[in-house]
């Protein structure tokens, strides 16, 4: 089914305007043609899910053209605001392989002249980032010579930093969907429903409820819906827990971190429980965690930075004598599919990691992400919630209540 | 025995057009509107030649051959004369020729996928034209 959206729809995005912003930045940096390859760029420009290696060529004026694996090109065109003449397929055939086809297309755009081609190079801790590989870079360089390839991903990073209303509305909807998943999990686990249940079943219950509510997939590359129980909640660092067939057990903590996608906007909310019963010590850990999450959410607003947040929150944890259990980071980036982890521009002291001095601005969207881990006691908690930065506060998009419940 | 024409000569082209019109009905052509230019590199005369087809609503409206740059077409397939000749003679299938990378296609691959069966039908008809290669 086509996802083409009417202009007055709350989820509408002005894609021609989005492309025009990129083209203005290209002109400013003397880029004649932009060759995007990152998943975040494809999502931002095409509004289509591109699971196969894909590229987007943005000319100095006019409509971009996406190149994707031919078996999926018709579907991408159906999903995208771009028409089928602007979503082309590459294939293992003469002239149709990705390097030849795209290089020929770019040469046509350059009209026989030599130009500066913006490409996306770099690195990421996020596997599906999609920077050009060394092989691709060298092959495009040879095919497009004497034109010059220049690293230009900062253009996309810059124009995609602040989210428009349609994009934020999509994030709001994705979070409402995630809340439906959490309700379904809580209902299923309550009143002894947890007995005999595995982590994978919990993941599936959430998935079904979210799909019924309109999610198209549990997008996270960390394992879809991440469910951990018992000692698996307390891994040091602890931010990746694909579900296993481990059965839920009384007296153990349970971490339910579920993901929904709505029109390429990403829902991501983690909620925590105790199964059956909890000790006083476990409840002490839980209270520490709830209190620091509340304080963190209260502190986010335009003007603060990741490092000031970390300093303030770790001071609080130190004061309450649980600093040793906190992972000292409180957020990660988020955008349309493919945009995860790094926040803001590549401007920090460590290349391609979040700049600790990044100053949050209104209408940035990020994930408030906090991890509490006490491996020696087999306990840990995770909080994740997409937030929209406002002038004096943040808007937490998932509304599922913040607490750590004991499920009888 | 039918007269043999020199492959890609004007006479061969006229005979090819006649047979294509007779054998490929609009239904068989899927009421297609498109055009394709085959560019033959390194022909026996040392030059490049082209073979151009155009159809509208499944009717073949133009078949032409010539030297140099072909008319604008939705698809352009470029390759060595010898390979095209083997294709026309049925010694090699178009899929193999394209997948080997020896033929270069220009145009929308997605649309080309839809037209593959039609292209095969055209190729089969061309193979029936008695020719000297």
Image: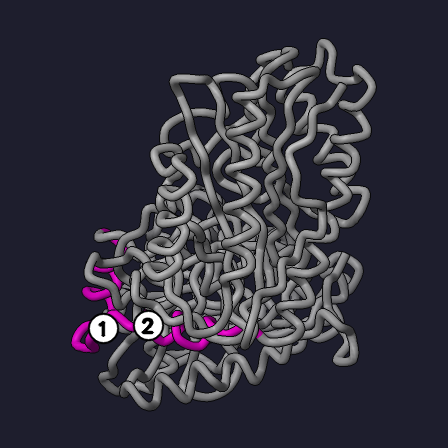
Image height of A390 relative to A279, above or below: below
Where does the magenta region start and end? A135-163
Instruction: Determine which of the numbered discs, if any, sits on residue A150 in the image.
Output: 1
Position of the C terminus of chain A, as image quadrant, is: top right
Image height of B10 relative to A129, above or below: below
Image point (66%, 39%), residue name: A403
Image height of A19 relative to A137, above or below: below
Label 2: element kind: helix
Q: Quadrant of residue B45?
A: bottom left
Q: Residue furthest left?
A: A146
Q: Quadrant of residue A276?
A: top right
Image height of A216 relative to A48, above or below: above
Is A144 within the magenta? yes
Q: Which residue is mark 2?
A: A154
Q: Quadrant of residue A287?
A: top right
Can residue B12 be seen?
no
């Amino acid at each position: 089914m086509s996802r083409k959206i009417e202009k007055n729809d709350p989820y509408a995005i002005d894609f021609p305007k989005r492309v025009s912003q990129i083209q203005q930045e290209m002109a400013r940096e003397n880029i004649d043609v932009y060759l995007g390859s990152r998943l975040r760029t494809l999502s931002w420009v095409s509004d289509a899910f591109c699971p196969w290696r894909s590229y987007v060529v943005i000319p100095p004026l006019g409509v971009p053209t996406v190149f994707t694996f031919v078996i999926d090109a018709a579907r991408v065109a159906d999903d995208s605001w771009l028409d089928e003449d602007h979503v082309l397929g590459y294939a293992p055939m003469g002239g149709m392989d990705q390097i030849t086809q795209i290089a020929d297309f770019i040469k046509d755009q350059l009209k026989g002249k030599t130009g500066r081609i913006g490409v996306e190079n770099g690195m990421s801790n996020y596997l599906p980032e999609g920077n050009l590989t060394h092989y691709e870079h060298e092959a495009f360089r040879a095919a497009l010579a004497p034109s010059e390839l220049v690293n230009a991903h900062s253009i996309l990073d810059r124009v995609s930093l602040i989210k428009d209303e349609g994009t934020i509305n999509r994030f709001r909807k994705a979070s409402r969907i995630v809340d439906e998943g959490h309700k379904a999990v809580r209902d299923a686990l309550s009143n002894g429903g947890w007995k005999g249940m595995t982590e994978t079943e919990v993941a599936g219950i959430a998935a079904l409820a979210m799909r019924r509510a309109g999610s198209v997939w549990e997008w996270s590359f960390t394992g879809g819906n991440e469910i951990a129980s018992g000692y698996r909640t307390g891994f040091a660092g602890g931010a990746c827990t694909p579900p296993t067939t481990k059965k839920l057990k009384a007296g153990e903590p349970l971490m339910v971190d579920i993901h929904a996608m709505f029109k390429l906007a990403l829902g991501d909310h983690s909620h925590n429980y105790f199964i059956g019963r909890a000790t006083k010590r476990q409840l002490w850990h839980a209270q520490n965690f709830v209190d620091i999450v509340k304080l963190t959410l209260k502190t986010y607003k335009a003007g603060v930075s990741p490092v000031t947040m970390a300093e303030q929150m770790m001071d609080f944890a130190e004061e309450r004598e649980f600093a040793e259990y906190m992972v000292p980071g409180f957020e990660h980036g988020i955008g349309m599919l493919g945009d995860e982890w790094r926040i803001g521009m590549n401007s920090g002291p460590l290349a391609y990691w979040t700049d600790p001095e990044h100053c949050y601005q209104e209408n940035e969207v990020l994930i408030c992400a906090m991890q509490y881990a006490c491996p020696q006691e087999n306990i840990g908690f995770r909080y994740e919630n997409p937030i929209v930065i406002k002038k004096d506060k943040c808007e937490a998009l998932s509304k599922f209540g913040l607490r750590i419940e004991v499920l009888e | 025995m039918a007269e043999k024409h020199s492959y890609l000569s004007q006479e061969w082209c006229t005979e090819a057009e006649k047979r294509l019109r007779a054998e490929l009905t609009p239904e068989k052509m899927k009421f297609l509107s498109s055009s394709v230019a085959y560019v033959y590199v390194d022909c026996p005369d040392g030059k490049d030649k082209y073979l151009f087809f155009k159809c509208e609503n499944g009717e073949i409206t133009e078949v032409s051959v010539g030297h140099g740059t072909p008319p604008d077409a939705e698809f352009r397939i470029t390759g060595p004369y010898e390979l095209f000749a083997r294709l026309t003679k049925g010694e090699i299938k178009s899929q193999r020729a394209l997948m080997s990378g020896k033929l270069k296609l220009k145009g929308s691959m997605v649309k080309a996928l839809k037209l593959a069966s039609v292209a095969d039908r055209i190729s089969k008809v061309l193979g029936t034209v008695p020719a000297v290669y």
